[in-house]
Amino acid sequence: MNIDLADVTLHVDETLDSDGLAQLEEAFRARDGVVSVHIDPKRAHLFLIEYNPELVNSQDLLAITHFQGLHAELIGL
């Protein structure tokens, strides 16, 4: 079985502490279809998310941040 994956970079406007970063990362990982979440410690406001577009899309991922009470933009598709 061959699965095509997509990735997106998401910019979170708020500055999150380590607990906030972990909580948001866990929210992304809990979404069916998310394969990986990477946060660069030097740019903790950027999340690189790899996902299966047959199960989830970039707007779903953006909605996760809004559900967490955060503001974010998709900056790479």
Image (spheres, rainbow, N blue to C red):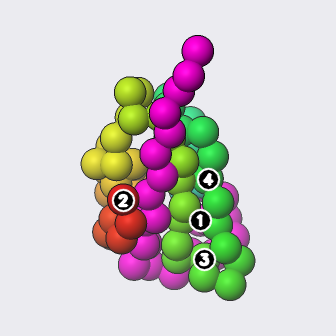
For residue 77, which numbered disc appears in the image? 2
Label 4 is placed on what type of residue?
Answer: Val
Badge 4 or badge 3: first in the primary sequence: 4
Residue 39 image offset from top left, x and y in percent: 64, 66
Badge 1 or badge 3: first in the primary sequence: 1
Label 1 to label 3: alpha-carbon separation? 11 Å
| Mark whose residue sits in front, 4 or 3 | 4
Secondary structure state at the residue bearing disc 1: helix
Residue where numbered disc 3 is placed: 44
Image side of residue 46 versus residue 72, left or right: right
The magenta span reads: 1-23
* Residue plotted at (48% across, 52% down): 7
Q: Are marks 4 and 2 in contact (CB under 8 Å)?
A: no
Residue projecting furthest to the top: 1
**Mark 1: few/some/many CA within 10 Å (<14, 14-19, 20+):** few
The answer to which of 54 and 38 lies nearer the viewer is 54
Secondary structure state at the residue bearing disc 3: strand
Residue where numbered disc 4 is placed: 37
Image side of residue 17 versus residue 73, left or right: right
For residue 20, which numbered disc appears in the image? 1
**Mark 4: few/some/many CA within 10 Å (<14, 14-19, 20+):** some
The answer to which of 55 and 19 lies nearer the viewer is 55
| Mark whose residue sits in front, 2 or 3 | 2
Label 4 to label 2: alpha-carbon separation? 15 Å
Secondary structure state at the residue bearing disc 2: loop
